[in-house]
Amino acid sequence: MILSGKEIQRRIGSEIIIEPFDEQRLNPNSYNLRLHNELLVYDEGILDMKKPNKIQRIVIPKEGFVLEPNKLYLGRTVEFTQTKDLVPMLEGRSSIGRLGLSIHITAGFGDVGFSGYWTLEIHTIHPVRIYPDVEICQIYYHTICGDYENYASGKYQGNNDIQPSLLYKDFE
């Protein structure tokens, strides 16, 4: 079951933490999250799953930054989120999608107990100018049924920045 916006607001501070929280970004069954002012791009032609890949950091100026097609950009949310007893999910806003912009390629599903900033896997089908602090995606929450263990991966839990792939750690 998906929580309503009113239920999200009721659970803020207990099962749901969104910092900073702004009631104006609450929707009927989700909450809009904003794009931070930095992006990461891989600085290599071929990415290797078994090693850390070189990255370059880009600061998005107030006047915007143009994303190029066929290039992967990693961003993050301005908001820190944490959940207890709920499964967080992330989707791009429809207005963003209608510009040909995808904000997560495969990682829209969060684990119960996730705590941190959301890394966004951003891709566009044609050039699009983006801006810092734009409401780029929405988070919504599913209830969970049955016994479970909270997410405790050392790779991404409790992050403070954009997270490039740490898949190489699975090969160690």
Image: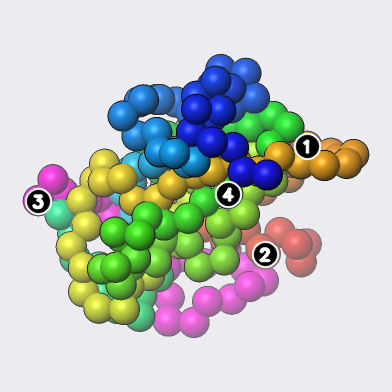
The residue pinned by badge 2 equals 168
Q: Residue at x 43, y 75 (%)?
A: 44
Q: Of tags 1 and 3, which is closer to the observer?
A: 1
Q: Residue at x 62, y 54 (%)?
A: 109
Quarter occupied by the N terminus: top right
The image's mark for residue 89 is 4
Amino acid on which the number 3 mark rests in the picture: Glu
Asked whether disc 4 touches disc 1, contact meaning CB atoms under 8 Å apart, the reply is no
Amino acid on which the number 1 mark rests in the picture: Asn
Task: Return the x and y of residue 78 as percentages of the image width and height.
Answer: 37, 37
The image's mark for residue 63 is 3
Q: Of tags 4 and 3, which is closer to the observer?
A: 4
Asked whether disc 2 touches disc 1, contact meaning CB atoms under 8 Å apart, the reply is no
The answer to which image quadrant residue 65 occupies is bottom left
In the image, the segment drawn in magenta is: 40-63
Task: Return the x and y of residue 22 as percentages of the image width and height.
Answer: 35, 25
Task: Return the x and y of residue 12 as percentages of the image width and height.
Answer: 54, 21
Quarter occupied by the C terminus: bottom right
**How many numbered callouts?**
4
Mark earlier in primary sequence (4, 1): 4
- Categorize mark 1 by other alpha carbons within 10 Å: few (<14), some (14-19), many (20+): few
Q: Of tags 2 and 1, which is closer to the observer?
A: 1
From the viewer's perspective, tell me whether residue 48 is left or right of residue 37. right
Q: Is residue 168 above or below residue 6?
A: below
Amino acid on which the number 2 mark rests in the picture: Tyr
Q: Secondary structure at mark 2?
A: helix
Mark earlier in primary sequence (2, 1): 1
* Inter-mark Cα distance, 4 to 1: 15 Å
Asked whether disc 4 touches disc 3, contact meaning CB atoms under 8 Å apart, the reply is no
| Residue 73 visible (yes or no) | no
Task: Return the x and y of residue 34 as percentages of the image width and height.
Answer: 34, 42
The residue pinned by badge 1 equals 150
